[in-house]
Image: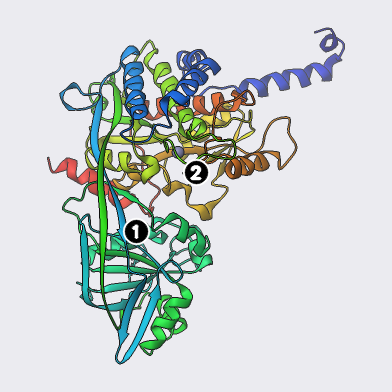
Amino acid sequence: MGRVMKLGRSGALLVTLALASAALAATSPVPDAVEHAARTYITRPALEAPIRFLSSDLLEGRSPASRGDQITRLYLQTRLESMGYAPAFANDAWQQPFAIVGIKAQFPPTWNFRAGNERVGLAWRDDYIAMSGLQSEKVAVEDAELVFVGYGIQAPEYRWDDFKGANLKGKILVMLNNDPDWDPKLFAGKRRLYYGRWDYKYESAARQGAAGAIIIHTTPSAGYPWQVVQSSWGGEEFQLPAGEEPRLRVRAWATEAAVRRLLKAGGQDLDRLLTAARSRDFKPVPLGIHTSLEFTNKLSQVETANVGGLLPGSDAKLAAQVVVLSAHHDHFGIGEPDANGDRVYHGAVDNASGCAQVLAIARALASLPQRPRRSLLALFVAGEERGLLGSMYYAQHPSFPAGRIAADINIDGGNIFGRTRDATLISLGKSSLDAIAESVARWQGRTLKPDQFPDRGYYYRSDQFSFAKIGVPALFFDDGTDFIGRPAGWGRRQIEEWELKKYHQPSDRLDGSWNFDGMIEDAQLDMLSAWLIAQADALPTWKPGDEFEAARQRALAALDAH
Ligand SMILES: [Zn+2]
């Protein structure tokens, strides 16, 4: 204080200005009570205790259907109940059970193709990798013709349709990975949309009634080398039980070299086909190549469940709509020992930390003197590590109609390295939720950054994606990288080293090195955003032309139909 007194007139003016700008920066987007709840309930002990419990050896890595999985679910439901939440599912159930089907396919060492008198064989692993599309013990494809279908995309918002009404029933579709990326106005340019991902390709082929699909692997178009396809595919695969949806018999990848060999036998040239595929006028090209294929599957089935608690909204009308706060509760269970002999996949960051954040946020929101206008659903989904299965199941059987789910705020992981000047918003650019996140981040004195690794497609790799598919916009943050008190590049190094040494390994465990300050601030950012979404008069909207806008329109139209 003494020093301020000696500053004189201009100094006093500077101080006044500094105070004014501090007051301006501190203008909170939420009322005092909300801010107070965030500070009171989103604290280090509120986060650390559940992480310690969920990642302990006793929970055995929380693999679906294990004892650890059952204890995890009971713990989460008990916490929600004690906070005053109501059971989220029909018949007063806290849990939404579903089955996970395991499929271990046995493909032939050589997959044979025939073009006129020529025979070409693709070798398992070296040339092709495949998974069963059907959940049956024996699958056969008989004398199916191969058809090149370019990118295999139908996207009305880009006036793009690679199929052009061709009859593709029973065919094997050969398709390119990625989406058209040479024009910023087409498929968001370099950014890989859902249309550019392998799961879309197989769904798209199945909608055409095809018998199978072969995606041509190139490292630039996939974003990873063939070894990654070899190591992540061809083992046991997990799915929800098959329903009425169209399904392929075989879902395959083949190397570029193998496809070139195959096409040559049919008198076709891959480069010519690639050029043709770059046009809106592209039409499917029958390749004059046929194949028959038989393989067997070993099937298994286990049961797990999503856990959910509901905080009913206070507004007579808006309470019929819900803001979802989600985090997956599963991890990899017990597996191969690491270098230290540890066999438990603790999943402390992934995703005990996300569960702990949702619990703390749920507690803070339940403590408010006045309940938020919209209802809030704290949702702990199962089977994320098996392929987003729990959130997919919830999206297919939602406790609120999709058109009444305002938004999903998903948390998968947490910052353990300290406070940052920035926050990474993976969903930035997709919906009106950006403005809400922006207002809270600005109040925290932080800047929002887009996905720092756009080629990795993080938006499509956690549970918010299951919500996007039914038209629900999401907020999905990742760690900031600009750490306070650390040199430039330090944050990125920590994150990359963590991914290398701990991601999906037994060593992802809680220890004394964790700094919770950043995680606290991130969870407060999520909580205040949730409150603002719950209070807003209007539902959030996708940015016009977004890849998921049509799904939202369908969900809203379905409400009107009732
Ligand atoms: Zn995760």
Where does the image place residue 547, in percent across and percent down from the top left?
37, 54
Disc sitting over residue 426 in the figure = 2
- 363 and 351: which is toward the camera: 351
At a point 21% along the width and 27% down the height, the residue shown is 89
Secondary structure found at label 1: helix
Q: Relative to 179, does residue 425 appear above or below in the rendering?
A: above
Rendered-image quarter of ligand 1: top left
Where does the image place residue 515, in percent across and percent down from the top left?
62, 25
At a point 46% along the width and 36% down the height, the residue shown is 412
Disc sitting over residue 200 in the figure = 1
At a point 25% along the width and 23% down the height, the residue shown is 94
At a point 31% along the width and 45% down the height, the residue shown is 471
User: How far, Cα to Cα, is label 2 from label 1?
Assistant: 20 Å
Q: Are marks 2 and 1 in contact (CB under 8 Å)?
A: no
Give the amino acid at mark 1.
Tyr
Q: Is mark 1 within 8 Å of ligand 1?
A: no
Of labels 2 and 1, the one closer to you: 1
